[in-house]
Image (cartoon, rainbow, N blue to C red):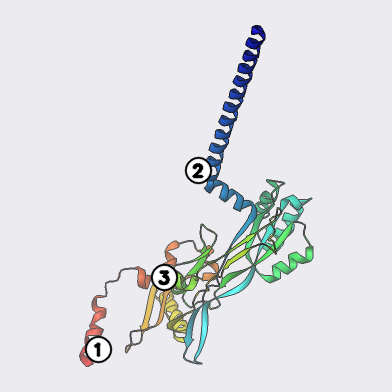
Amino acid sequence: MRFLARENRRASNRAEGRFKILMIFFALLFAIMIFRLFYLQILQYGFYSLYASDQHELAAKLQPTRGQILVCDKADGALHPLATNRLTWQVYASPKDMDDPVSVAHALSSVLQVPDADIVVKLTRDPEDPYELIAKGVDSEAVKALKEQSLPGVGFLQSSSRLYPEKNIGGQLIGFVAYDEHGGLSGRYGIESSLDSLLGGTPGKLLAEKDAGGRRLAIGQTQIQEAKNGSDVILTIDRTIQFKACELISRAVERHNADGGSIVMMDPETGAIIAMCSTPDFDPMEFGKIKNLSELNNPVTFNAYEPGSVFKAFTMAAGLD
């Protein structure tokens, strides 16, 4: 009987020891799980929140409409745009949806006037590439010609580009817009640059939920912050006088074989600038063709000038006044 009692106690002790080991194991496992949850939900919250939003949220930047640069023409009293906007297109391609990317590249090159080799490289370097931008600022006629060909894997996105309808009226005064490092348009030189904050407006934002294919969910939550369009700017420049001033200074420089020249006309009562033009000049629609970057600067506001005897006329005018 004593022997049986000792065996029972030993068996009970062994069972109790196993139970304690199991309790310690589950306690350690529970502690590890708690630490892991703390690490993921607290310490790594920012990373996984961003990762989840990238999978389920669609974010887009809403571009504002850029304001116009306007001048008045006293001949008819109407406002005329020196810089305005026009409807254009972006042409893009999806190489993974093409059976013969080389032939597609040839077709795009002939219509868009883009070097054939450049497009071939874009469409053949990665057969699984879902998106390649081919050209920006494409006019409607070119897009129509491409749509008639029904090229596989070629798409079009409506956009807006800058239009400068007046030629030979002072490109250095107006300036131009170009794409910056963030893919947006910003003013460069002239009025486009100095008043960029007014003309450019404020971009908006679109935040929506998307499905696994990247499409926006109609029943999902959507947050929209509307873009604020840019303001129009009306200059004191008189269109007719400006055109004539540019014509006269161009003739004078050519006649005297000068390196360049500038002309400024002011309203003597208010000091308003009614004409400002220099030569050599450039066309804002073709600023990419400029070889000498100094031609982009407006000599009237950029270069130093020692007036000398020119101010004798001001002295005489003051005396007469």
Marks 2 and 3, how far apart in space? 46 Å
Q: Which mark is residue 115?
A: none
Residue 132 in percent (x, y) is at 66, 54
Q: Which mark is residue 194?
A: 3
Q: Residues within 10 Å of mark 1 (few under 14, many from 20)?
A: few
* Side (left or right) of 213 relative to 77: right
Name which quarter of the figure residue 270 lies in: bottom left
Identity of the residue drawn at 63% across and 61% down = 208
Q: What amino acid is labelled 3 in the image? A: Ser
In-front residue for pair 271/198: 198
Residue 48 in percent (x, y) is at 57, 47
Q: What amino acid is labelled 1 in the image? A: Ala
Residue that badge 1 annotates: 317
Measured along the vertical axis of the image, is residue 145 above or below residue 152? below
In-front residue for pair 198/118: 198
Identity of the residue drawn at 49% across and 77% down = 231
Measured along the vertical axis of the image, is residue 321 above or below residue 203? below
Mark nearest the camera among 2 and 3 is 2
Q: Which mark is residue 43?
A: 2
Disc 2 or 3, which lies upstream in sequence? 2
Q: Determine whether the residue tagged by mark 3 lies in a helix, strand or loop.
A: helix
Whether residue 265 is visible to the viewer of this picture, yes or no, is: yes
Identity of the residue drawn at 24% across and 75% down = 308
Q: Determine whether the residue tagged by mark 2 lies in a helix, strand or loop.
A: helix
Q: What amino acid is labelled 2 in the image? A: Leu
In-front residue for pair 48/31: 31
